Image (cartoon, rainbow, N blue to C red):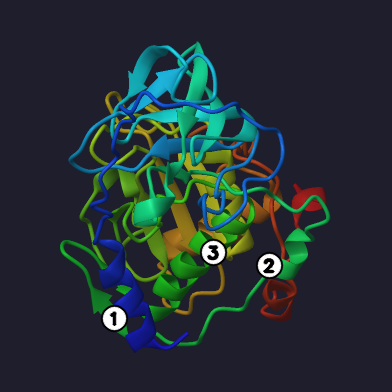
Amino acid sequence: MATSQSLIKALGRWSSLILVAVGLLWPAAIHAQDADCPAPEHLAPRLSVNVRARVEPGPGTANNLRDTPGLAGDVIGQIPPGGQFIVLDGPQCADGYVWWQIDRDGVQGWTAEGDASHARYWLEPLTLPVDPTLDEGSLCQQPPDDYTVIKFDYARLNARTVAMLDHATQVYHALGGLLDVEFLNALVQGSYNPVGVAASFGTHDAGGAVDLSVREPGTYIILRDEIPLMLRALRIAGFAAWLRDTDELYAGSPIHIHAIAIGDAELSDAARQQIDGTFGYLRGYNGLPQDSGVPLPDTSGDIVVCPWMIELGFEDLRELG
C-alpha cells in the first residue's frame, strides 16, 4: 500500500456519517409478508438475522419499535440515533417498509430499515455475516517495506505500521467485526516515543509499536464483546497483540490493546523481545517481563504465524517455552 493511499484513508476515517434516523408516524397498514421485499417499493435489506446493528447516528428522530411488523403495530418503545440492538428475525414487508424483529436491552419488537421513497436507510449493520469456509490464512498479507514516518495528531507511525493497521481493519471486517472500528482511529500511543510512557518500558521508543483504545468513541463504553476479534485481526495482520486490562500494568492503568509489528526493522530492543524473547508472543507468553523470571501465559488468543513471517525468520516457538 502506498503511503499516499494510507494517508488518504486515514484522513477519511475521521469523517462520520451524519444521517438522520426518522421515526415512523403514519397510521395506514397492510399485512406483513414472509416473502422477500421487492424493489423498488422496498430498500434492498442490509441487515440479517443474528447481526448487531444500530439506528444511524446523527441528529434526528428515533426509530419506533412496534409489537408487530407494520404501521398498525402498537409502538412499544423507541431506539435513539446510535442505539444498538441484535436482529432476531426478518425481513418482513409491510406498508412499503422492510421490517426486522430486534432485541434492545431485553425489549423485543419490530422496526423499519428505511424509506425507499427517499432511498434512505435508518438502520446499519455493525457486524457482517462471516463465511464459515473462510480460511484465515488467506487473509495474511506481507506489509510494505516502507519506513517513512507519518505524523498523526499526537503520535507518529511508520508507513509499514500504518499499512498493517489498515489491513487489520480489513481483516476485522472480513471476520464480522464492528463496522465502526478503524484501528488508526483507535490509536492512543504510537511509535518513536522515547521514554514517553514509563509503563511501556521502552517498547514505544522506536518503530512498530502501538497502543489502541478498546472503547467506543463518544460513549467510552468498553467493547468487551469485540476485543477478541480485534486481537485476532491484529494478529493476522502481523502484530504481536495483547489486551492490557485495567490495572494490569500498574494501579489505575487504563484498558487498551498493546501491539508490536512483527518484522519491523526499526523496533526497539524491548519491543523485539516482546515478539520472540523469553516472555514473547511467539513463545505463547504475554510479553511482560516478570521479576520472578517466570513468563505469564498469553490470554489474548492463539498466535498467528503467516508465511511471510516465516520467511523473515519468525516461527512458532511455543514448544521451546
Q: CA distance from mark 1 to mark 2?
A: 26 Å
Q: Position of residue 303 (x, y in %)?
A: 69, 51
Q: Which residue is mark 1?
A: 149
Tag 1 near tag 3, CB within 8 Å = no
Q: Position of residue 100 (x, y in %)?
A: 55, 31
Give the residue type that dot 2 points to. Leu
Give the residue type that dot 3 points to. Gln
State the residue at coordinates (57%, 56%): 39
State the residue at coordinates (33%, 52%): 186
Q: Which residue is mark 3?
A: 170
Q: Quadrant of residue 50?
A: top right
Q: Which residue is mark 2?
A: 139
Left or right: residue 196 versus residue 321 is left
Q: CA distance from mark 1 to mark 3?
A: 22 Å
Which of labels 1 and 3 is toward the front? Answer: 3
The answer to which of 282 and 225 lies nearer the viewer is: 225
Label 3: which secondary element = helix
Q: Residues within 10 Å of mark 2 (few under 14, many from 20)?
A: some
User: Is there any visible trace of residue 279 in the rendered image?
Assistant: no
The answer to which of 306 and 48 lies nearer the viewer is: 48
Q: Residues within 10 Å of mark 1 (few under 14, many from 20)?
A: some
Q: Looking at the image, is mark 2 or mark 3 earlier in the sequence? A: 2
Left or right: residue 200 versus residue 169 is left
Q: Position of residue 221 (x, y in %)?
A: 33, 29
Relative vertical location of residue 136 with respect to residue 123 in this rendering, above or below: below
Q: What count of labels does the image hold?
A: 3
Q: Looking at the image, is mark 1 or mark 3 earlier in the sequence? A: 1
Which of labels 1 and 2 is toward the front? Answer: 2
Give the residue type that dot 1 points to. Val
Q: Looking at the image, is mark 1 or mark 2 earlier in the sequence? A: 2
